[in-house]
Image: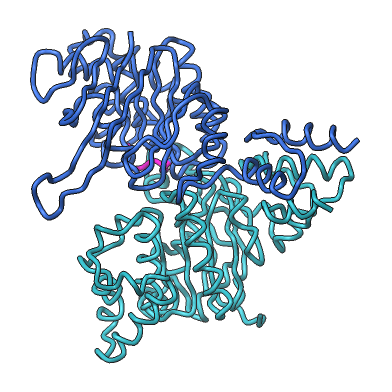
Amino acid sequence: MSIIVKNLGHVYHPGTPLETRSLCDISFELERGTWLSVAGHTGSGKSTLGQHLNGIIAPMEGTVTVDGMAVKEKGPDLREIRARVGLVFQYPEQQLFAETVYEEIAFAPRNWGTPEEEIDARVKEAARAAGLDESRLTRSPFQLSGGEKRKVAIASVLSSKPDYLVLDEPTAGLDSFSRRELADLLAGLKEGGMGIVLITHDLDIALSRSDAVLVLDGGREAALGTPAEVLARLEENPVPGLRLPDVAALSLLLRQRGRKAPVTWDWRELKNALFRSSK
Amino acid sequence: MSHKTVCELRDLTYVYPGEAAGDSASPRPALRGVSLSIREGEWLALLGANGSGKSTLAKHLNALLVPSQGECIVYGLDAADEKNACAIRSSVAMVFQNPENQIVGTVVEEDTAFGPENQGAPSGEIVRRVEKALGDAGLLAKRKKPTYTLSGGEKQRLAVAGALAMDTPCLVLDEPTAMLDPQGRSELLDVLEKLHRSGKTIVYITHRLEEIVRCDRAVILHEGAVAWEGPVTALFLSDLPLKDWGIDAPPLFSLWRDMKSESRPVPPIPTVASMADALCL
């Protein structure tokens, strides 16, 4: 069971003066129970890729299949694909609309035809999983802080129990504790068998938490592999506008100045290597 | 830097209307007894976790909110008096988190001109201010471009240019880097550093410890109250319970703190360059 993306390409406004290529020849496979991070700077095609994964955009070049079902503009599988792949958009305030947080989270499972007696349990479970305090359920989602709105947006997708979760830049605007909480939440969902696609410009989280990383540059694959492989690749072939995490940048700078230092984003590993070799 | 005070908050408490009216028996203030002076020409960092009251405080500085209790004096004017709101907003400009929400023009220079046009500035003056603002924000080369063609970092710098064109002595930025990638973030901080050197008073709100290394002074908010206040260098010297205040140390800072605790030589403030210098001694 996996999402398979093969030679995916996308052009916005084809045949007009505004024609812009957004994706070119992207291929990867995401199995359930694994976590792929898609990194790249603003405008690299990350969000366009994410929107292909549950059929908001149908492929114009190449294919996307979800558990064997092809993503197409129309067709009987589209509903099932959207039930399996949950998408959390970049700006949570744009997907909130209900009068209370409870109604917001209950909307999707109701829409999918979940029996009413199950809804309450679904809502509470999703709120808990997203780290949202139960006291917030009676509030208007518009009264919440930015961080809490984001948690509501995630809970409202979790409540329909997707098999894959695609999150577009969910950490923007979250403080570092909330970012870590969110990363822990995703790791827990992954352990439970969910496939995670995290779209982010935060290379620190991408490298330190996921199983695989895809780096996009101008819509093309700049690196794909395990975090260690991807960091090594980025050090050799820097992507303009994509900065290495500070610890990785420091380690690289030390190497350039003739010190022995590892290819790593982990400060403990760097420290151990530095002070072992100096003794 | 002079010691003239730009903004003076005295025992400021703020309760959001929903809290006061509403569902809980004891309303929870967003700000509790905050006293703070902002000095002319300083670059002040306002640091705190999500929900610590940073944005609520910022909105008092240009009279978008008025205190429930206590006082907020901006350039000698009492912000609680509605008649002062206009004068205060001509002295303090705001830049918000999401660049998409603060762009009104379709072309870069039109967007920048919106503020001074609204203030009723004469047209020659508008042209001069727009040119200077775009230059300071590093966007002069893009002045004729449609705003939708800008990157996220450029859009946020456009928002800064719009605020600069208002020609206010003080600029308040509420998490302006939250939606930006690391590259956009450092571009924006470069612009602010230049403005700071030219004498502008800057209040910079963030939850990222690594972003305040260029500021003069920091104020840490925790649950609506001032938890700590002092020069940025002192923030790094002291052993503050940052974790208890919801402020997490980025990995580079963890390395720095760990080396310091083992009495190894470390720079006064951890940056990639300063750490590399210290480690190559």
Image quadrant where residue B264 sits: top right
Q: Is residue A78 left or right of residue B113?
A: left
Above or below — where is B219 with respect to A133? Answer: below
Say which of A7 and A154 sits in front.
A7
Colour in which chain A is drawn: blue
- The stretch in magenta equals A141-146
Picture residue at 73% right of the left edge, 35% below the top: A270
Image quadrant where residue A143 sits: top left
Say which of B146 and B244 sits in front.
B146
Above or below — where is A68 with respect to B241? Answer: above
Q: Is residue B102 left or right of residue B255?
A: left
Q: Does the stretch in magenta take in B174? A: no
Chain whose colour in the figure is cyan: B
Say which of B85 and B145 sits in front.
B145
Main SS of the magenta part reads: helix
Quadrant containing the C terminus of chain A in the rendered view: top right
Picture residue at 40% right of the left edge, 64% below the top: B157
Scheme of colours in the image: by chain
x, y percentage for residue B70?
54, 64
x, y percentage for residue B222?
61, 47
Q: Is residue A249 left or right of residue A188?
A: right
Picture residue at 70% right of the left edge, 36% below the top: A267
Q: Is residue A273 left or right of residue B82?
A: right
x, y percentage for residue A132?
44, 28
